[in-house]
Amino acid sequence: MSGPEQGEKAGSGAAKWYELFSRGARDWLRHDEKVRESVRQHLPQIVAGGEVINDGARTVRVPVRMLEHYHFRLRRAEESQGAGQGKAKPGDVFSDPSKQRGPGEKGPGGQDEGEVQLLLEFKVDDIVDWLWEEMQLPNLKAKVGPSEETDWIREGWDRRGARSRLDRRRSFKELVKRRGAPGATPTFTDDDLRFRQLARRRQPAIHAVVFFLLDVSGSMSDRDRKLAKTFFFWVVQGLRREYRSLETVFVAHTTEAWEFSESDFFKVSGTGGTVTSTGLAKVRDIIDERYNPGRCNIYLFYASDGDNSVSDAGESREKLSSIAADACFTGYVEVSSGLSRQLATEAGRLFAELATAGCAAGSYALNDFDDVWGAVRHFFTAESRAAEGPG
Amino acid sequence: MTEPLSEDWKGYVQRIEELATRSGLAYHPVDFEAVPDSFMMEIAVYGLPVRMPHWSFGVRYIYQLIQRHMGHSRLFEVVFPGNPGHAYLASSNGLAENILVTAHVLGHADFSRNNLLFRRCQEQVSEHIVEHAASHARQIQQAIETYGAQRVETVLDAALALEQHIDVDVSLRRPRYPEYETDPKALADDEFRKRFAALDPTAAPTGIELRKRAPVPPHPERDLLWFVANYAPEMESWERDIFLAVREESFYFYPVFATQIMNEGWASYWHARLLREADFIPQQAYVDAIKCHSDVVRPIAADQQVALNINPYHLGFSMWEKIVEAEGLDAARNIMQQDDDFGFIRNHLTRELADELGLFRFSARSDGQVKVLEHELTGLHEAILSPKYNFGAPTVSATHVRTDGTLELTHDNSVDGRGLDLERSRKVLDYVQRVWRRPIVLTTVNQAGSTLELTAP
């Protein structure tokens, strides 16, 4: 755009100042930042929102409102007067199209017409980071320490080495450093060459497996399962931070027990009664078959509404203590929509006994999505205490 | 300074200006500048070409972007009063639009130079608001560098939340309240004191001992920005400066707000009239410009039968046409100089004109049902004006500062007819409390009409 005559004055050919950056966009970015901050302050609500979990993706979507900069305003009047223009006679009644709301929108709460909703995407890892900060947890200690696995890792440079480990970028830097006069044609000498060095290092190779055991008997409603799913989701996120390789095993039971893939697991619904010991037996079998408790950290989380047949108590107790002996932690969430019996159930009693016996075990009653945050916090603080205890 | 505007257009500017001067318009010179649409949008968002940064402008910016994407609004021009005035024209304007806009801008320039409210505010703020606002922006930028964005934002949150709470009836640069109550009678007329003084001159009470400390504030204070800046117990001087900068800009915005109908009407009247009289404009450009005029100055959107708001361009334009027709141009100029929208609507919007324009008064229920009310002229006037009362804000005044520094604010619900929105008010108190640094108590009424106190923290 700039012609030769403009080039004479320095800078006069440059873009106008207002083309250099957008102040509106700058202030908008600040708004965005504030939204993220405030979302961060409402993590429990996000954790609770079962809907935000985006299967498979490592992000959650959180619908947020635009922030409002508040001013003193009068309360909304039941009836207000205004002036308009057009073909209307006194007594005419019609409805204001701008005030008509969609069926999904809130009635009295919706203050502003034409409100814009934003959908912000958050990385699950970020949220878990924030949760961890919030909970101020010590790093969880694994029951099974790092194995003696070793690995070659890169460490430093040397002037000698195999040709295949020549670091071209580094060598070029050396050339540039050495070159005195600018403009001279650069040529590499042997002194410039740098080779990557390898060293043997012990790598902590901590493996863990989480068993999710879900009661899918007829008494578990859809909502109960969803509650359990939300809880399981955040447990996995939490544990994944601690273990480099984390396996998940999903087992569902009624009077029998089956192992499922993650995708099928939450769709399962069964009928009939509850025999907890079948599920626990299945878990025991899988541990024996596939996982060596000496090499692997085992976690068990059991979600149920707590109704177990009384005759199964002895069997369950036996299985559960055998698992608990090998596991880092066993947790029980009681999902009971509506009636809050607060763990005074058969299954609740089982885990309470376990905890009194000194095993790392915890229970939590999950009545509502708002409780999920509390449950996650409860289990992870309990878990870290349990891990610290035996040392 | 001036971005190359089309040569065609430049040729017309001078001739339009000559025509305007001959028609009696008297204005300060105006600098025209063509700017890209994106910048026009920012001017609309910030209200000034360069203004302080704040996230709330970001919100308005996004709403504007959305509006523009939906094709709702297109800005042709923005003009700032001053000597010289600054007019920004959208560089996407065609020739016809620019001719129309030029005439429109001259109407605004005439208005802002001669209208008393504008003049009074400009005398106080200065005739260089554009430059002043830019220097405020720079001052705040410096504060950000010195004190950090977080602290500056805290101050701006509070100051901009109170931006409508000024008192234009008092001077922009007003002195602090007198520290002592003046009660000259007590000194002069008291027989006892005269006798007492005569007995022993050395024991005579000095004037200072007799004076009583005046309460702060001595009367309910509407100018909250000024009051906080001057009487906050622990405010730092740079924070006061930010409050006063926001207040100065509010003094500039007030006449723009309080004369919108007159001002836009006046500018529209003059662009229509100058265009009619400008025989030098080619036929096609004239037709295009008139089409553009009727798009802007129209009562209701083309696809609607009824609008639940009133287009200030159309209302003002129609009123000025009527006034000039009935009373002549000189009378119209007098009204233009002396009134603001309150006087203008109440005195000059007649029953006949209201009927002719199809203006009506309605009552809207919160569920969206709207009922057209009986014709009643005074009621119609007030329905048009009510959004403009008190700079569009509830009447909240500072009424007392307790000895511990607690600030008492009082909402006058007898004026506003109902109480404050509690949720929002609480947030505003939170903002202000962070700079006042002592508790704040706000008195208003609840739904049932009984007194209610909000406190922060």
Image (cartoon, rainbow, N blue to C red):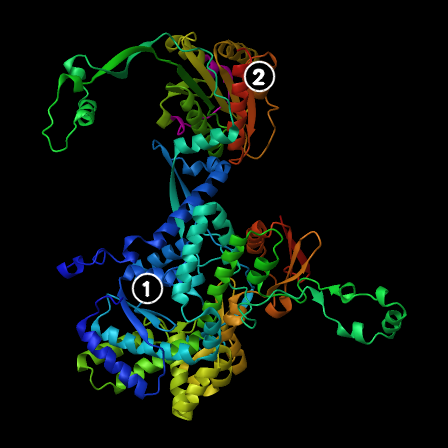
Dot 2 crowding, Cα within 10 Å, few <14, some 14–19, many 20+: many
User: Which sits in the foreground, A102 or B334?
Assistant: B334
The answer to whether the residues at label 2 and label 1 have Cβ atoms under 8 Å apart is no
Residue A308 visible, this angle:
no
The picture quadrant where one finds residue A178 is: top left
Residue B72's mark?
1
Q: Residue furthest right?
A: B199
Q: Position of residue A126 (x, y in %)?
A: 41, 33
Chain on which label 1 sits: B
* Residue at mark 2 to residue at mark 1: CA–CA distance: 66 Å
Give the number of the mark in front: 2 or 1. 1
Helix, strand or loop status at disc 1: loop
User: Which sits in the foreground, B56 or B192?
Assistant: B192
Q: Residue furthest left?
A: A185
What amino acid type should be assigned to the residue bearing mark 1?
His
User: Which sits in the foreground, A273 or B144?
Assistant: B144
Which residue is under mark 2?
A: A350
Q: Which residues are magenta?
A: A265-281
The quadrant in which the N terminus of chain A is found is: bottom left
Q: Position of residue B331 (x, y in %)?
A: 43, 90
